[in-house]
Image (tube, helix red, strand yellow):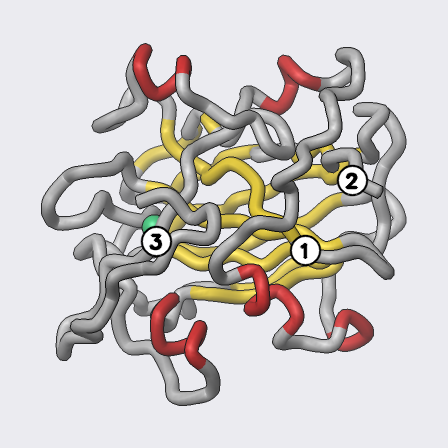
Amino acid sequence: MDRRGVAFGLGSVGVLGIVAACSRSGSAQAEQTGQAAPPVRSDLYVCEGCEATTERAPAGLTPSVTLAPPGTPGERLRLTGRVLAADGVTPAADVVIYAHQTNAQGLYADGSSESVWSRRHGRLRGWVRTGPDGRYAFDTIKPAPYPDMTMPAHIHLFVQEPGRRPYYIDDVVFDGEHGVDGAYRTHQELRGGSGIVRLTGNAEQGWSAVRDIRLERHPG
Ligand SMILES: [Fe+2]
């Protein structure tokens, strides 16, 4: 499901959890670094769920956070990266990144009653704020695709720079896995660069993935 201002269609926030809205992908971060700045997107702020990015005060955030506590069913995953300014070179400090994802069953389950987004996005969500080097890390589990397998397994990411409105960037998806094929690559929006990452590690010891983010230019 596309997240650009389209209703979730989630009237059924079920007992087991939710299969919620999604955006499409991104670009291999390293491939983007140093390239010419992308054009300004007039629809940069058109986004469903961006409000969740502002649910935590930036001052209280750190560059790393645990989305999925130890013991959460699933294969461990450490997602890291560096946020760069639109020039593709300068580390971007104090950028808030909000992440949410499905669990190992492919569901946005066990959300709290804190907000509409805490219910829709499920339990596996969290915020970081980049340090001076622009780096961030999420300790989590590897998400599973939705049960209907209509999309690749993915992690949603939103970013917000100080004094700016938040926007979504291409989902983190896993190269070589279900749905990450030629058609997917062709239709990437490449917001924040590509979200296609390569996993290293293994299911037993845990996976690692790097999703660098090149910030978008702001309209106006
Ligand atoms: Fe999703």
Give the position of the N terminus as an image quadrant.
Answer: top left
Residue 197 appearing in the image: no
Residue 210 quadrant: top right
The reply to whether callout 1 and callout 2 are in contact (CB within 8 Å) is no
Crowdedness near tag 3: few (<14), some (14–19) or many (≥20) residues, C-alpha within 10 Å:
many
Give, as a three-letter code, the residue at label 2: Pro
Name which of mark 1 and mark 2 comes first in the sequence.
Answer: 1
The residue that mark 2 highlights is: 219
- The residue pinned by badge 1 equals 166
* The label number, if any, that marks residue 118 in the structure image: none
Q: Residue at x 24, y 26 (%)?
A: 179
Viewer-side residue, 74 vs 108:
108
Badge count: 3
Which quadrant holds residue 153? Answer: top left
x, y percentage for residue 197? Answer: 47, 27
Residue found 42% across the figure and 78% down from its top: 116
Disc number for residue 21 = 3
Query: Which of marks 1 and 3 precedes in the sequence?
Result: 3
Q: Is residue 83 visible?
A: yes
Say whether residue 115 is left or right of residue 44.
Answer: left
Residue lying at the far left in this picture: please name it.
148
Q: Position of residue 190 (x, y in %)?
A: 56, 26
Instruction: Please tell me which residue lies in front, 47 or 130.
Output: 47
| Kind of residue sitting beneath label 3 | Ala
Residue under the image location 32 percent in, 11 percent down: 182
Q: Residues within 10 Å of mark 1 (few under 14, many from 20)?
A: many
